[in-house]
Amino acid sequence: MKVLSLFGMFMLFLCVSCSTVTQTAQPAAPAAAKKTPAQKANDNRVAVLNGADITRSELEEFLGPALGQIRQQEYQILSSGLKDYIFLKLQEKEAAALNISVEEYYKQNVTDKAGKPTEEEISQTLNQYRSRLPQDEKEARQKVMEFLDGQKIQQQEEIFKNELLSKAKYKTFIQPPRLDVKITENDPKKGPADAPIVLVEYSDFECPYCGRVQSTLEQVAKDYDGKILHVFKNLPLEFHKSARFAAEAALCAKDQGKFWEFHDWMYQNRSKLNSDGVKEYAGSLGMDVDAFTKCMDEHKYAAQIDADVVQAQILGATATPSFFINGRLLRGAQPLEQFKEIIDQELEFAAQKAN
């Protein structure tokens, strides 16, 4: 569970109530009989249209992104809830060893250590949310103090939770949703073919956010040297007039082993994404400019770019940049920590599988 932003927490404090769901243990179900192939086929059937089956697999492929988003939300709820549940069980064990209640154990390690808000913090919050607070100064101050107390408790709880979890021996088997990203021989790649992490980038050479995230990707490659296969796919957006031209130029450069040089140069020189600009740069790299120009004029890679765009739409990658890390979708120019969180999880899953 991540600590909310100050604004998010404050709105939660003012507007949201809590509820508790109690689960009742259910009796174990009897063992299911082994199914025949015909029965298994029927299980996958969701409808019959004019005598022909419509299968669940077909429906899920049709729903694509919408269903993927729901499954991602389910995964986030389950994985976060699992950590909270393990945190509770660890507290119960420690409290029992000390012969005190869980409530007292939590108080000693979280509430009592959280600290109190300073006058500076109170004044800053009062000023920042003045229009949303009660007009009465005393009442407004009380609301702010209660909010800041809650924020500090939540922050201390996160610290203490991470401390207990780091000492505990446990494995998680909840798997995140993954999408099947088709990778072809013609896709530009760098890194070991058998790397445990496959990072697929859908990008647009005219997109400023795509350019901004490149330094993050370089750091990812350094931090996980030899563990990542980076695959590039084109997703030129229609409102970027030079994006498709640049995509074709990069793939034509790939014919002469210069894709990644063009890749880096184009993000840094968006104003030069035109015929003269790319030919001049091709010449500076010692490329055969005539062959490069012929490739461009013939639109040799138009079909490959079209295929990339279609697959991106099917996968729900509708904006640039979009990334799939072992099939897990990450949208936007995210900070390094977001990439590392997913990569570390995937490496941990791989290690658990190996053991």
Image (tube, rainbow, N blue to C red):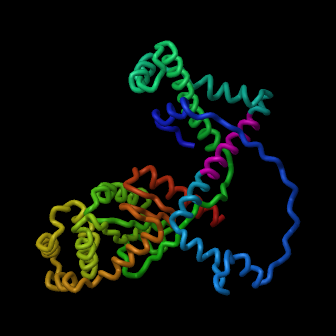
Task: Judge whether residue 100 is colored magenta.
Answer: no
Please name the residue shown 55% across and 66% down the image: 178
Q: Which residues are magenta?
A: 77-94
Q: As displayed, is residue 203 above or below residue 135?
A: below
Task: Judge whether residue 81 is colored magenta.
Answer: yes
Q: Position of residue 195 (x, y in %)?
A: 48, 69
Report the quarter where the N terminus lies: top right
Task: Report the residue that reaches farthest toward the top.
Answer: 138
Report the quarter where the C terminus lies: bottom right
Query: In the figure, is residue 97 to the left or right of 119?
Result: right
| Residue 189 picture quarter | bottom left
Please name the residue shown 38% across and 61% down the image: 319
| Residue 186 picture quarter | bottom left
Circle count = 0
- Dominant secondary structure of the magenta stretch? helix
Q: Position of residue 126 (x, y in %)?
A: 43, 21
Q: Which is nearer the eye, 112 or 152?
A: 152
Please name the residue shown 38% across and 67% down the image: 202
Q: Position of residue 93 (x, y in %)?
A: 76, 38
Q: Position of residue 300 (x, y in %)?
A: 27, 85
Please name the residue shown 88% across and 66% down the image: 30
Q: As displayed, is residue 96 above or below residue 199?
A: above
| Residue 168 picture quarter | top right
Query: In the figure, is residue 2 to the left or right of 331?
Result: right
Query: In the figure, is residue 209 to the left or right of 56?
Result: left
Query: In the figure, is residue 204 to the left or right of 311?
Result: left
